[in-house]
């Protein structure tokens, strides 16, 4: 396999099967049959995505050639960034006019779940975004059954992962491509050691305003609404699908068809929730693209080590307890106290602070004899004053 700039397709005979990966499981169906790891002549290891008969029949070959050559023409740092974010076609496989499949980079191993079943069978399976729709109980049961280290992803972790996803969506938009076939099965992720997303099936990406490699198709849950169903893929369709991904992950219902603003507002501001709901109902709000860029860019910062936070209209930073679902338990723990270095000067308290009343000193009882002496002294004093006034006035 030569690295010539104009060579975009390689014969399948130049590929060699990679051994030692028998535990790895790859998704079949849709566009592809039997993905497998192969070595190419450049010494690289790739995932071969063979196309099934229907895909070969409908494939638009010039768009695939453009995708391969577009990647190759990127500056080295941008090409590395594309490969970090996306399973972009590196080469087509077959011959011109007879494309059999594509070569793509394998997702990072951290994005594979190591499953151990009760019988001891071990498999490594890509961790898809659909896992973010599970609630605590289903997640814990699945972790127990498959021997997983983690079964549930709290709302801040969901948003952190989805924030990384939108970063990739926006990165492609800025370079002239829409994701197109965007849904919870078309990206894998990890949260260890950091949140990261890898977009799959990038041969479904479409040049903005142009024709893509594949015939447009969507899962039923992500089809555009009503009269927009046959609209070409573009920024608006990516926004619509992303809005539904956020809603279904936070509400923890993969088959959800009705947004619940109350649940959404437990983990985000009311204005963002309102815009997402409008977008999911097919109404593109003015400035939504800029709004999503600004909001989602902050989502990865909602998780710092083992500490998780949300930003809502109640507070800009509120701690989120482990294992708690926004769809099930709305109550949160109080926000953590700020460190001494960042404590601001407190505002004046207007509510009166109750003070403990000072105890009343007991009154000593007056003895009778002492009372008589006091009375006699007072009378004598008054008599003397009267005499002085009488005789002194002469």
Image (cartoon, rainbow, N blue to C red):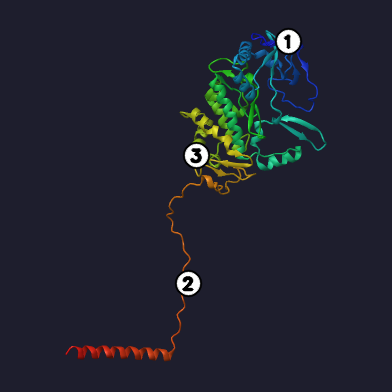
Q: Position of residue 295 (x, y in %)?
A: 52, 33
> Where does label 3 land, which residue?
270
Of labels 3 and 1, earlier in sequence is: 1
The reply to whether discs 1 and 2 touch (Cβ–Cβ < 8 Å) is no
Percent x, y for residue 330?
57, 46
- Crowdedness near tag 1: few (<14), some (14–19) or many (≥20) residues, C-alpha within 10 Å: some
Tell which tag, 3 or 1, sits nearer the viewer: 1
- Residue 306 seen by the camera: yes
Quadrant occupied by the N terminus? top right
Q: Which of marks 1 and 2 is nearer the N terminus?
A: 1
Q: In this view, does 326 lie to the left or right of 143?
A: left
Q: Which of 167 and 382 is in front in this view?
A: 382
What is the x, y in percent for residue 78? 59, 20
Q: Where is residue 304 in the image (x, y as percent from the top left)?
A: 61, 39
Q: How far apart are marks 3 and 2 (CA)?
A: 51 Å
Name the foreground residue: 213 vs 39.
Answer: 39
Q: Is mark 3 on a helix, strand or loop?
A: helix
Front label number (3 vs 2): 2
**Distance from the alpha carbon under mark 3 to that under mark 1:** 54 Å
> Left or right of 364: which side holds 248?
right
Q: Mark 2 points at which residue?
A: 359
Q: Distance between the residues labelled 1 and 2?
A: 97 Å
Where disc 2 sits, the SS reads: loop
Residue bearing mark 1: 11
Tell whether 351 sits left or right of 328.
left
**Residue 225 location, quadrant:** top right
């Amino acid at each position: 396999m030569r690295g010539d700039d104009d060579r975009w397709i390689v014969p399948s005979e130049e590929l060699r099967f990679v051994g030692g990966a028998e535990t790895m499981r790859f998704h079949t169906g849709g566009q592809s049959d039997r993905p497998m790891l192969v070595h190419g002549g450049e010494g690289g290891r790739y995932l071969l995505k063979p196309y099934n008969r229907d895909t070969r029949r409908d494939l638009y070959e010039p768009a695939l050639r453009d995708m391969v050559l577009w990647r190759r023409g990127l500056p080295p740092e941008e090409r590395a960034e594309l490969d970090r974010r996306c399973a972009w076609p590196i080469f087509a496989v077959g011959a011109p006019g007879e494309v059999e499949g594509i070569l793509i980079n394998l997702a990072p191993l951290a994005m594979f779940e190591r499953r151990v079943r009760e019988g001891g069978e071990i498999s490594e399976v890509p961790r898809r975004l659909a896992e973010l729709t599970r609630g605590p109980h289903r997640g814990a049961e699945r972790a127990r059954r498959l021997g997983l280290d983690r079964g549930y992803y709290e709302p801040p972790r969901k948003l952190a992962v989805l924030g990384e996803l939108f970063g990739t969506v926006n990165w492609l938009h800025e370079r002239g491509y829409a994701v197109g076939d965007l849904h919870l099965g078309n990206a894998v992720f990890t949260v260890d050691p950091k949140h990261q997303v890898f977009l799959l099936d990038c041969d479904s990406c479409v040049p903005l305003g142009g024709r893509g490699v594949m015939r447009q198709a969507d899962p039923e849950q992500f089809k555009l609404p009503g009269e927009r169903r046959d609209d070409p893929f573009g920024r608006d369709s990516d926004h619509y699908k992303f809005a539904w991904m956020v809603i279904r992950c936070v509400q923890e219902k993969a088959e959800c068809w009705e947004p619940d603003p109350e649940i959404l507002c437990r983990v985000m501001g009311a204005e963002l929730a309102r815009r997402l709901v409008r977008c999911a109902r097919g109404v593109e709000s003015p400035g939504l693209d800029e709004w999503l860029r600004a909001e989602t860019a902050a989502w990865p910062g909602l998780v710092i080590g083992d500490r998780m936070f949300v930003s809502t209209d109640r507070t800009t930073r509120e701690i989120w307890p482990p294992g708690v679902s926004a769809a099930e338990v709305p109550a949160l723990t109080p926000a953590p106290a700020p460190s001494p270095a960042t404590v601001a000067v407190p505002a004046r308290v207007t509510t009166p602070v109750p003070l403990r009343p000072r105890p009343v000193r007991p009154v000593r009882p007056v003895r009778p004899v002492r009372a008589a002496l006091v009375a006699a002294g007072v009378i004598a004093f008054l008599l003397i004053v009267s005499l002085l006034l009488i005789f002194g006035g002469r």
